[in-house]
């Protein structure tokens, strides 16, 4: 029996804690910092996810055996390296492996080196050269800042003027700080976007059901880009043929490429894919679970998550049969009124009786004994069902039982 700690405090971490809470290998479950929903199934400790020393003290104090590092930032800053150096079993990639996500230039060069299909791209660390290239480019075109930019560092430019402006914003005015010291200017891919996440132990890879998320704030894909307003799994656009092609041309070459580059990736690899008419292409890698895809995908997991995590750390993932329910996973984000621009926190929340759905908390807190909003994305209401229509009925039939001032959600999640 193990004491397990999850790092993070959003809806994704609630879904991880939910999956872990079903394990029969766990003695006690902990979460740093967690949120009001996670607190119902785990002991939460209010610490910064960047306070590695503080987290390590807590690990020793609570006799924690296993740590699941979920968010991208602490991974990129080397939390797994830090813990492993101190003899703590931590699940997640090292900082070197997390560069697959934390540097888009690194991941592009990696894909080119290993022949993994991706958008054609040029890398620049000088605004003048980038602008000169744009003079003769084809439009639309995609401009990406190299580093982590809270999901805002990618700008799709319809014409030359927009692209020049994007270079000024990113490289000259430093809209995303040092993340924009280098940019990628890349070919605009056309097709359906699909996510495939996979467990990886450094040698073996085991893929999860495919998924899709809805990024725009409002119905019909209108409004600003958000961290995601809902998701579902599997994607109807990721066929068996796509999956075979993906395994042969993307997943396996990624694992063997990492290995041959001397990078041991143990954790979750997130493949952002475009189904183009020239086949499956990689848009990006993330080096962790996606949010909100996780809240749709992970409830489908049948296998004990502790067994999978342990096998990834030990390099024995091939010995575990990872099984998934052959059903639809579905999740809708309930957001604060102004999300993603102006988020007001601290509104009191009431929740009616829910039935047959799973409520994940994303941004909630307890204040003066009351449950209040504490972020842009406040909840994710998830379910599993036999098909998409049943899933939509189940979630949308109950979503209005969750009430707080100015709350809103998209009504078209799962309509593709
Ligand atoms: N080459 C491309 N062609 C078309 N769309 C793209 C391309 N690259 C990125 N996008 C779009 O921009 C979004 C964000 O880009 P991505 O590379 O995933 O960066 P991040 O998630 O770090 O912001 C993608 O989900 C996709 O919709
Ligand atoms: Mg992305």
Image: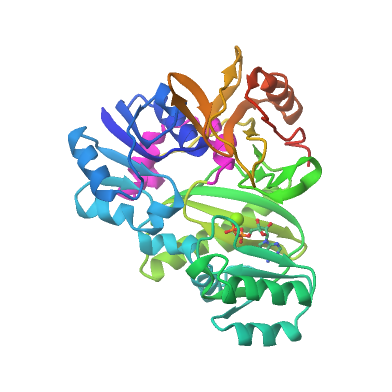
Along the viewing direction, whichever of 220 and 336 lies nearer the viewer: 336
Residue drawn 73% across the image and 68% down it: 188
Position of residue 115 measured from the top left corner of the image (x, y, whole percent): 57, 72
The image shows residue 284, relative to residue 110, as above or below, that is above
Position of residue 360 measured from the top left corner of the image (x, y, whole percent): 53, 29
Residue drawn 73% across the image and 65% down it: 189
Visual colour scheme: rainbow
Along the viewing direction, whichever of 40 and 311 lies nearer the viewer: 40
Position of residue 385 measured from the top left corner of the image (x, y, whole percent): 66, 25
User: Which quadrant of the view contains residue 390?
Assistant: top right
The image shows residue 324, relative to residue 340, as above or below, that is above
- Count of marks, rendered view: 0
User: In the image, is 171 to the left or to the right of 25?
Assistant: right
Q: Quadrant of the C terminus?
A: top right
Q: Is residue 266 visible?
A: no
Please state the extent of the stretch shown in magenta in the rendering.
Answer: 290-319
Position of residue 8 measured from the top left corner of the image (x, y, whole percent): 42, 41
Quadrant for ligand 1 reads bottom right
Q: Is residue 313 magenta?
A: yes
Q: Is residue 229 visible?
A: yes
Q: Is residue 98 magenta?
A: no
The image shows residue 53, relative to residue 329, as above or below, that is below
Residue drawn 58% across the image and 61% down it: 284
Q: Quadrant of the N terminus?
A: top left
Dominant SS in magenta: helix
């Amino acid at each position: 029996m193990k004491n397990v700690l999850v790092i993070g405090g959003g809806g994704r971490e609630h879904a991880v804690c939910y999956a872990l809470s079903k394990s029969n290998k766990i003695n006690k479950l902990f979460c740093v910092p967690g949120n009001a929903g996670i607190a119902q199934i785990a002991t939460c400790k209010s610490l910064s996810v960047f306070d590695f020393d503080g987290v390590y003290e807590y690990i020793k104090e609570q006799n924690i055996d296993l740590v699941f590092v979920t968010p991208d930032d602490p991974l990129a800053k080397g939390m797994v390296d830090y813990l492993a150096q101190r003899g703590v079993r931590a699940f997640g990639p090292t900082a070197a492996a997390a560069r697959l996500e934390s540097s888009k230039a690194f991941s592009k060069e990696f894909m080119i080196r290993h022949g993994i299909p991706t958008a054609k791209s040029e890398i620049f660390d000088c605004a003048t050269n980038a602008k000169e290239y744009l003079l003769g480019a084809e439009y639309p075109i995609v401009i990406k800042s190299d580093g982590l930019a809270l999901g805002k560092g990618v700008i799709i430019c319809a014409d030359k003027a927009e692209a020049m402006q994007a270079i000024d914003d990113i490289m000259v005015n430093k809209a995303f700080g040092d993340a924009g010291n280098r940019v990628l200017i890349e070919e605009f891919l056309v097709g359906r976007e699909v996510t495939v996440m996979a467990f990886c132990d450094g040698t073996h890879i085991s893929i999860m059901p495919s998924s899709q998320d809805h990024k725009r704030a409002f119905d019909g894909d209108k409004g600003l880009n958000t961290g995601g307003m809902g998701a579902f799994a599997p994607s109807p656009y990721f066929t068996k043929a796509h999956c075979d092609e993906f395994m042969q041309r993307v997943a396996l070459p990624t694992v063997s490429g990492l290995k041959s580059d001397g990078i041991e990736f143990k954790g979750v690899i997130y493949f952002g894919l475009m189904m183009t008419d020239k086949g499956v292409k990689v848009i990006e890698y993330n080096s962790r679970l996606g949010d909100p895809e996780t809240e749709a995908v992970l409830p489908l997991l049948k296998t004990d998550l502790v067994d999978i995590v342990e096998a990834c750390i030990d390099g024995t993932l091939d010995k575990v049969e990872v099984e998934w329910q052959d059903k639809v996973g579905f999740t809708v984000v309930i957001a604060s009124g102004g999300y993603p621009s102006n988020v007001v926190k601290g509104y009191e929340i009431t929740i009616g009786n829910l039935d047959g759905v799973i409520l994940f908390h994303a941004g909630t807190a307890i204040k003066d004994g009351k449950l209040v909003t504490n972020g842009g994305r406040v909840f994710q209401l998830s379910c599993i069902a036999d098909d998409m229509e049943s899933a939509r009925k189940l979630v949308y039939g109950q979503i209005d039982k969750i009430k707080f001032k100015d709350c809103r959600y998209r009504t078209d999640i799962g309509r593709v």
